[in-house]
């Protein structure tokens, strides 16, 4: 098998399995592109991202230009003369000058079945929309945002218990497998012709903001349950219960025949923390109140007999 001269571009944890697979293959990257280090965590300390740390541990050259818009920012990449540039959650759009640089162009691993959910939050949006399945798409990049023709794709069902964190990890592992399949087909001359996306089916997955995770008890309980799953592990769904702020880590929609107002706790089922919604009710299973640890709703109730 002919070894390809590859460069990998990625930043967060989603890209790590693909980079690990590439390092272990015959096509170990000559260099890794990743976004500049940023402050993170409670101490706001500047630390390397997951992709950078993996590259450093593997002894691979790391490039961190703030953009690739100037000839100077692209000079080292041009010197490497890559056959293929592979991206996964890199976070920066590649200009035409970079797209045209590698012999085989640039590939991108995206966590959805394109053209559905182009953009920054495909995993969360798939859960929020109640999609039955999602997957990973490997596309030939163009100058648009996730608009390039799809080379290969892999599907997975979305379980009713899947949080975005669980789905993220599964899709990250799938992306590594898909990448190796595509590389094998490329070097053997069996890579399929990329398939143009159907623009009429395109949907957009915007960047998630903390305020998106606020629970409005007037909404349908099924919708709120999907929000809890979609916003775990970040930013975590939150609302107000009996005048107290509460963060909700796990919940499920339940049937309810009650005239209670949305946001009112239903007490007909002792030991369960159930909140009336605009339609149905939401049983809170794992919560956190200010200044306290994450606990099961049952433990929270047991510690407060008056709330029984």
Image (spheres, rainbow, N blue to C red):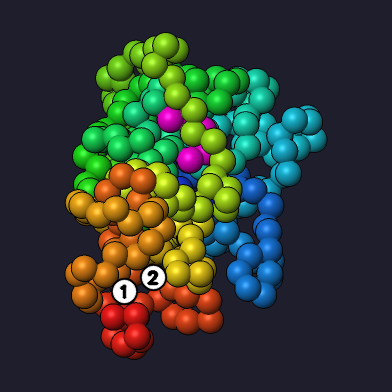
Q: Position of residue 94 (x, y in %)?
A: 62, 29
Badge 2 element: strand
Q: Quadrant of the N terminus?
A: top left
Magenta stretch in the rendered image: 117-121
Callout 1 secondary element: helix
In the rendering, at what x and y percent does residue 307 appear? 34, 80
| Magenta-colored segment: predominant secondary structure | loop
Q: Residue, x 22% and y 47% (percent of image)?
A: 159
Vertical comparison of 291 with 65: above or below: below
Is residue 169 depicted above or below 94 in this figure? below
Q: Quadrant of the C terminus?
A: bottom left
Q: Is residue 32 above or below residue 275?
A: above
Query: Does residue 183 appear in the picture of this structure?
Result: no
Q: Is residue 152 left or right of residue 45?
A: left
Residues at marks 1 and 2 touching, judged by CB atoms closer than 8 Å? yes
**Residue to which mark 1 is pinned:** 297
Residue on which the image places disc 2: 287
Q: Quadrant of the rendered structure where residue 69 is? A: top right
Q: Measured from the top left, where is residue 127 in percent x and y? A: 34, 42
Give the farthest residue toward the front. 259
Q: Is residue 118 covered in magenta?
A: yes
Viewer-side residue, 127 vs 40: 127
């Amino acid at each position: 098998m002919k070894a390809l001269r590859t460069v990998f571009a990625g930043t967060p944890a989603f890209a790590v399995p693909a980079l690990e697979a590439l390092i272990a293959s015959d096509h170990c990257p000559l260099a890794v592109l990743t976004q500049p280090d940023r402050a993170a965590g409670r101490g706001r300390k500047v630390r390397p991202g997951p992709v950078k740390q993996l590259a450093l541990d593997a002894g691979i050259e790391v490039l961190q230009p703030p953009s690739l818009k100037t000839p100077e920012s692209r000079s080292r990449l041009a010197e490497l003369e890559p056959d293929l540039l592979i991206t996964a959650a890199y976070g920066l759009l590649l200009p035409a000058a970079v797209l045209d640089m590698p012999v085989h162009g640039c590939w991108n691993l995206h966590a959805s079945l394109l053209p559905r959910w182009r953009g920054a939050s495909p995993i969360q949006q798939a859960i929020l929309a109640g999609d039955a399945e999602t997957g990973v798409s490997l596309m030939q990049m163009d100058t648009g945002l996730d608009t390039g023709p799809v080379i290969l794709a892999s599907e997975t069902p979305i379980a009713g218990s899947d949080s975005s964190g669980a789905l993220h990890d599964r899709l990250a592992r799938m992306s590594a497998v898909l990448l190796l399949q595509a590389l094998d087909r490329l070097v053997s001359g069996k890579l399929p012709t990329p398939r143009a996306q159907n623009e009429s089916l395109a949907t957009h997955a915007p960047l998630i903001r903390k305020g998106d995770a606020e629970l409005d008890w007037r909404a349908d309980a099924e919708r709120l349950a999907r929000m809890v799953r979609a916003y775990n592990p970040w930013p975590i769904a939150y609302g107000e219960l009996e005048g107290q702020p509460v963060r909700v880590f796990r919940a499920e929609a339940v049937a309810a025949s009650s005239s209670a107002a949305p946001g009112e706790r239903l007490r007909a089922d002792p030991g369960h923390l159930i909140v009336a919604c605009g339609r149905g009710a939401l049983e809170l299973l794992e919560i956190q109140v200010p200044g306290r640890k994450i606990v099961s709703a049952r433990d929270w109730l047991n510690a407060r007999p008056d709330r029984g």
